[in-house]
Image: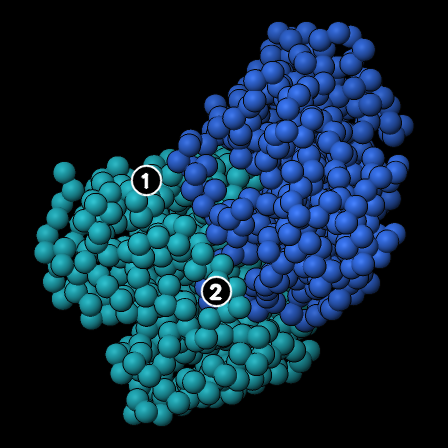
Amino acid sequence: MSGPASLAELVGRMAAVVGARNCFSAGPDLLTYECDGLTHGRTRPDLVVLPGSTAEVAEVVRLARAAGRPIVPRGSGTGLSGGARPVPGCVVVATSRMRRILETCLEDGWVRVEPGVINLDVTRHVSGAGYYYAPDPSSQSICSIGGNVAENSGGAHCLKYGFTVNHVLGARVVLHDGRVVDLGGPVLDAPGHDLLAALVGSEGMLGIVTEVTLRLLRRPEATRTFFATFPSTDEGGEAVSRIIAAGILPAAIEMMDRLAIEAAKAATGLDWPDVGAALLMDADGPVAEVEDVSARAVRIAREVGALELRLPRDEAERQLMWKGRKSAFAAVGRISPNYLVEDGVIPRSEIAPVLREIEGLARDHGLRVANVFHAGDGNLHPLVLYDARNRGEEERAEHLGGDILRMCVRRGGSITGEHGVGAEKAAYMADMFGPDDLETMRRVRAAFDPDEAMNPGKVFPSTRLCGEKPGPGGVEHPAVRSGEVQRW
Amino acid sequence: MVRERPGTPADAIQEVVPRIVLAPSSPAEAAECLARSAAERLAVAFVGGGTDLGLGARPARLDAVVRTGGLSRLVDHAPADQVVTAEAGMTLSALGEALARHRQRLALDAPFPSRATVGGVVAANAFGPRRARFGSARDLVLGVGLVRADGTAARGGGKVVKNVAGFDLPRLLVGSLGTLALVTQVTFRVHPLPEVEATVLFPGLEAEQVRALAAAWRAAQLEPSAAAAVLAAGRLDLGLRVEGFEAGVADQVGRLLALGRKAGLAGERLEGAGEAAFWRRHDAAREQGSLRVKLAAPPSRLADLARTWLASVVGELSPSAAVAYPTLGLAFASGEPAPAVGLAAALRDVRAAIAGAGGSLVLVDAPPAVRAAVDPFGPPPASIEIMRALKDRFDPDRRLAPGRFVGGI
């Protein structure tokens, strides 16, 4: 099944390229690579390789391909859609050792880094000079730039500043056959097809990024933050709509519902009140502009019935408010033994009715849902709470998650705003796109990787083998388990 | 039934006259046009407002032109969600008027707004000075409807401002010049119209002074939405646009002028006619002349860009105009070629020099004699093999705008 080289032979050859300690096919270290941030649906890879340079990545890819094995690229493994989930018989190529910041040019506003560099470390590297890297996923202190490129990661501030794709200027990529190619670069508008745009967000299916040139921004002069509470998400949603309608472009505008507030409080000890909804908004830019815009937004929040408005006294208090928001996912663990993180998008004007619909769906399934979301761009993160010890509850949670995603599509939205499709949502792609849409996307993949060797089994829906079911507690088809069939 | 007529010289793309012109009036008819082209094996090119037909090489073959002017409907505008979907043939002006009724705009100020269509702007990656703040089509496009060479209609992206589901077809089509698919409709993110706009002018600067002033406003954390340096008698007239609410705009204008004074530069806030006149001079550099050239270089090389490279091209033109966007590292020269021999040599020299800085020179429009002597894009990049593979997957018979693109694609 695995081509010319036996696994032992392949391990030996890989070790000769990357060093024996950076290549393993057994032992406890392998466990880490069975899944990413989406922890159900584990699959053990045959081999994990940690190359240290572009040349090593290229050689590793060539060896894996010569052995007829699929390749699963991996960054920090923090992804929430199973984008780095191994497939049977695969070689995981993790870029976590490639952590050098290679070159910085502040005047032209870019930095060139290796893919294993942590998102927040890019900003740390240039913050002394007053610059920063804008995309800020909640996992930014542990997620890697290579993973961000693969998933086109967002964050709370992409309402104003855009996603990873808006901040990547160039990339060096190792293709499926070991060829190395540079796409884009620090100078704008290189002639030719915008292959870089196709690469960002392709979930590791077009190649392995080994260097990335990122756009750096000058830090805004001022940031004004306010925290407002409302009786319910109806008023909170109304405040968001009116702020946007007033021509204000907040840097971020986040909302939490009652359950999420309760969880954040339990986890952080913040003295937030028990209310139906809380809004956290950042405005940034030159001081005079920000003062004006922030005052307008606060006025609107009052007009629609805010119960309480808090303005942080200093940066420390502001950071604390954001900590409450950013820790909300993990915080839900305080109020529920298990939970699923969903990631769907709706037109932002429909926030209030959508939340009511989610509440109804949750009731139908006999479960609770906490909602944390990027309200400005309609990106919902429903957290479906369940207790895996109760028989059938995990499956119900999975079904509820699916119902929520389909509702997002029905309302003209998307099945993912920032976590990616990965392995988890491939089945829902057919709800959002027709066969011709998907076939057109497959053509892009085929241009880069005709053999579909890079990160198989992600993004595109596959026909399920009978006897198999997706999601938590899902059972692999026996033929897959035994290695007779590979479901790429 | 798709409207059809014989092609005339007015339909020519760089002197190549199509046999027939097809004018679909709906996306469904556009799909019919391509299905028929596939069945009859016609080489076909797409024309919106025809404002960027000079971009790219002469088509290697051209049987049919599909004109998208009949696809001019506003499909959907959701002001509260700040998204708009328009058919490909809608002009930027028409779209702008529709959006302005809700105090919104598409922040894409490409040249020839009354003729340029949204589909054409996407295909040509056309942009204007506001790119400095709002980005290019690639940053504003959310979704596309397309028709493939085989007549299959498909779509990519979505209709919400945040979406990462599936491969990014919308951005892949930006700048693809009709070589991969026909764009039939586009969904954009839109922005609120600013309450106030102002322009601050610093006339008669040297390139180094522009660069120093840009460093100063960046250091001061000011955020002009556009910066355009119009070439005038060897010097640069720098116009900075500030937009937003009254209080913020007034403050930024005052601080920009103060920064200028500190550097010994006399600036002024332009009003009414003066402001319009400055931006008309800018527009002329983008829109006029049988020769138009685009240069791209690192912003830190502004002195070379303006004083050497732009000047070398302008020196061969009469009349001439030029503008540089100092924060983007992009510049345009335009005008009428003097003796064509000198111009071609100058273009080749500048291309070689700017390539050494990691940049490029592209012909946006050129008379046939210049085109015969200078490749529109220059040598293809190292990634050309993937571009060819992409072309093979989307258009295996090479019937969509054959020969028009980089590397003869």
- Is residue A335 toward the left or the right of residue A59 in the image? right
Which secondary structure lies at badge 1? loop
Of residues B383 and A175, the one drawn nearer to the viewer in this rendering: A175
Q: Residue at x 62, y 7 (%)?
A: A364
| Earlier sequence position, callout 2 versus callout 1 | 1
Above or below, comparing residue A457 to residue A273 in the picture:
below
Labels 2 and 1 in the same subunit: yes
Above or below, comparing residue B69 to residue A130 in the picture:
above
Q: Residue at x 14, y 55 (%)?
A: B20
Above or below, comparing residue A260 to residue A62 in the picture:
above
- Is residue B97 toward the left or the right of residue B62 in the image? right
Which tint was used for chain B? cyan
Distance of mark 2 from mark 1, alpha carbons? Answer: 26 Å
Above or below, comparing residue A24 to residue B19 in the picture:
above
Kind of residue indicated by mark 1: Thr
Query: Quadrant of residue A362 in the image?
Result: top right
In this orientation, does residue B354 appear? yes
The residue labelled by disc 1 is B152
Query: Quadrant of residue B378 in the image?
Result: bottom left
Q: Residue at x 29, y 42 (%)?
A: B151
Q: Which mark is residue B384?
A: 2
Letter of the chain shown blue in the rendering: A
Q: Residue at x 42, y 32 (%)?
A: A435
